[in-house]
Image (cartoon, rainbow, N blue to C red):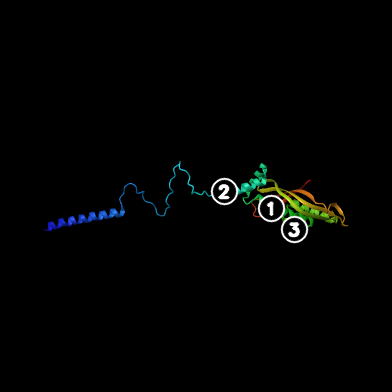
Amino acid sequence: MGDGFQFIDIIFLAMVAIFLGLRLRNVLGRRDGHEGGYRDPLRPAPAPERRPDAPPSDNVVHLPRPGEEAVSASAEGIAKAAQGNATLADGLTQIKLADPAFNPETFARGARGAFEAILEAFAKSEIDKIKAFLSAEVYGNFAEAVKARDEAGEKLENTLVGIRSTEIDEAHMDGRNAVVTVRFASDQINAIRGRDGQIVSGDPAQVAVVTDLWTFQRDTRARDPNWTLVATESVE
């Protein structure tokens, strides 16, 4: 009897083993060569490969890489300021490389404002107010002209009727210094009166077209963003 019971126990255990095996197979599945392997749940799924001959998807939006728009805008601004002048375009590009913040259009607006302020200060003999924006040489020339005028008892009457155009004429790098020459075409009324109030030169009733070339300079490695007027020239 003991041997009979042992045989029944073996058969029972074998049936339990087969049952458990079938259950595990249903829960875990079986390998058939198409499982794809284990994938780390913390790692994003790889993008599907595209055949070389497959057409591009219409749903893909290509965004510009960082800096592309800025570079494009910079090139357009330089081309606009250069107006087809290759030498000027090259000079502006060199300044842009040395000073990424440089913008020809913004610079021209600033130069226009400086032109108006400096003309007014010179006419009123108040050049000390603009000394910080003048090179030592230009300040010395202005101061000498003002002194001679004051000693002669003369008074300059200058009226800036309007500025016709402000165009960058030349640009280049001189070592670490950016140098830009601006051509101003303006309508002005200029007259000088003597001690007695009589007109010494000029005509207070005539508007004249005046063309000036002013050269500005700035150290591209300096923190100070201001430009300095280093030369002036009147074009007849």
Residue occupying image coordinates x 67% and y 51%: 107
Q: Is 229 placed left or right of 75 in the picture?
A: right
Q: CA distance from mark 3 to mark 2?
A: 42 Å
Does residue 97 appear in this view? Answer: no
Q: CA distance from mark 2 to mark 1?
A: 25 Å
Q: Is 227 placed left or right of 20 in the picture?
A: right
Q: Nearer the viewer, residue 33 or 222?
A: 33
Q: Secondary structure at mark 1?
A: helix
Amino acid type, residue under disc 3 in the picture: Lys
Q: Which residue of the protein is positioned furthest toward the front in this rendering? A: 58
| Residue carrying label 3 | 129
Image quarter of the C terminus: top right
Neighbours of disc 3 within 10 Å: few (<14), some (14-19), many (20+): few
Q: Secondary structure at mark 2?
A: helix
Q: Earlier in the sequence, mark 2 or mark 1?
A: 2
Q: Secondary structure at mark 3?
A: helix
Residue 153, how many percent across, how many down? 85, 56
| Residue carrying label 2 | 68
Mark in front: 3 vs 2: 2
Q: Earlier in the sequence, mark 3 or mark 2?
A: 2
Amino acid type, residue under disc 2 in the picture: Glu
Q: Are marks 2 and 1 in contact (CB under 8 Å)?
A: no
| Residue carrying label 1 | 109
Residue 186, how many percent across, how many down? 76, 50
Q: Are marks 3 and 2 in contact (CB under 8 Å)?
A: no
Does residue 160 appear in this view? Answer: yes
